[in-house]
Amino acid sequence: MTTNPGSPAPAKRAILVITSQVVRGGISGRGLTFALERLGHPVWFLPTVLLPWHPGQGPGTRLTADMATFSALVADLIASPKLSEIGGIVTGYLGNPAQAPEIAKLVKAVKAASPDALYVCDPVMGDTLGEEGRLYVPEPTAEAIRDHLVPLADVVTPNCFELGWLTQREIGSELQALAAARSLGVERVLVTSSPAMRRNSISNLLVTPTGALAAEHVTVADPPNGTGDVISGLLLAWLMAGASDETALMRAAASTFELVARSVKKGADELLLAEEQASVAKPMALISSRRVMEARGRA
C-alpha cells in the first residue's frame, strides 16, 4: 500500500487531563497540558481545584466546585458524542474525596467509548520530607484515590512515599519498591524517585508484566515542583504513540530531567516549559537504563 507524500499525517488522539489548575506556574494542569499539546495531542482539561500558585510558594485562595456542579460537568462529558476522540487519560491532584467516584465514572465511560484508551493515575497525595514522608492531602482524599482510581488504572505513577502509603510497605530499597509495585495489581507502575543504585542519583523504576526497568540520572538540587505531572503525561503520550516500555520510560525521564536541570540552571522556581519546550519533544540528556528483573516464569 502506498501513501501520498503530500497527505497530512494522522492526527494524534486527545488526552483527558483531570487535575488541579494554577494561575501562575508550570505545575499540574498548566504544565501537563502544555507538554502534551507540544507533542501534538489535543487536550480535554477538567480542573479539580483552582489555585493562584503552588501551595509551596505561599498561601492562596482555593476554589473547588461544589459536587453538584462537578458531577454535572462529568455527566456532560460522559454524554458527549465526541468522547471517543479520547485515547488517553491522566488524573492527578483532587480537590476533595467526593470527586474520585465521579472521575471513576468518567474513566469507565471513556474506556467504553474507546476500549484501547490508556489511563494513567498519578496518585498525588504526599511526598518525602527529610527522612520522613507525609500526606499533603486529607486522608479521606488519599483513600478515595486508592479505592476508586488506582484499581481502574493501566499505569500508576507514585513516588516512593505514595507507593509505601498505598501498599502499607516500607520502601527503602529498589527491591522493596519493586515488590510493592507488583502488589498494587496494576499492569504498569512507574515509581518516581525510586532508590537508585548509583550514589547521588534518582531512579525512575517502571514495573511491567515482563520485568522492570530503571532509568537513572544525577540528582538536581532544589528541583522545582511539577516533575511528577510531566513524567506521567509524557509516559502516557509515548505509550500512546506505540513506543516500547523502555523507549517510553527513557524519553519521559530524559525530558523531565532536562527540563529540571535547565530550569534550575536559570534560577527558576518553576519548570520553564515554554522556554525549554524543545526538551519535551527532543531531549538531549543522557539517561542510563538497566533491567532490574526479568519476567517471572508462570506455572
Image: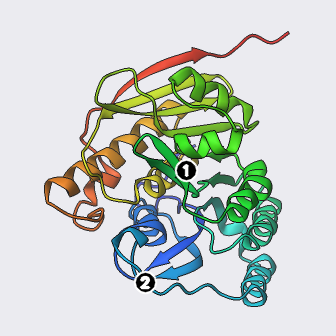
Residue furthest out toward the right: 299
Which residue: 81% across, 62% down? 108
Structural crowding at the residue carrying mark 2, measured as other residues with C-alpha within 10 Å and reported as few (<14), some (14–19) or many (≥20):
few
State the count of labels: 2
As drawn, 223 above or below 80? above
**Which amino acid, by three-letter code, is at mark 2?**
Gly
The image shows residue 37 at horizontal and vertical percentages of 44, 66
The amino acid sitting under disc 1 is Leu
Give the mark, 1 or 2, whose residue is nearer the N terminus.
2
As drawn, the label of residue 60 is: 2
Q: Tell me which corner region of the image, top left, top right, bottom left or bottom right, holds residue 283.
A: top left
Residue identifier under label 1: 236
At 31% from the left edge and 33% from the top edge, which residue is drawn? Answer: 217
- Residue 42 in picture, x, y percent from top left: 52, 70
Q: Secondary structure at mark 2?
A: loop
Residue 123 vs residue 266: left or right? right
Q: Quick check: can you spot residue 216?
A: yes
Query: SS at mark 1?
Result: helix
Left or right: residue 78 versus residue 199 is: right
Residue 281 percent location from the top left of the image: 34, 53
Considering the image in quadrants, where does the N terminus appear? Answer: top right
Foreground residue among 138 and 77: 138
Q: Residues within 10 Å of mark 1 (few under 14, many from 20)?
A: many
Question: In the rendered view of the protein, which quadrant contains the C terminus?
Answer: top right
Q: Residue furthest left?
A: 266
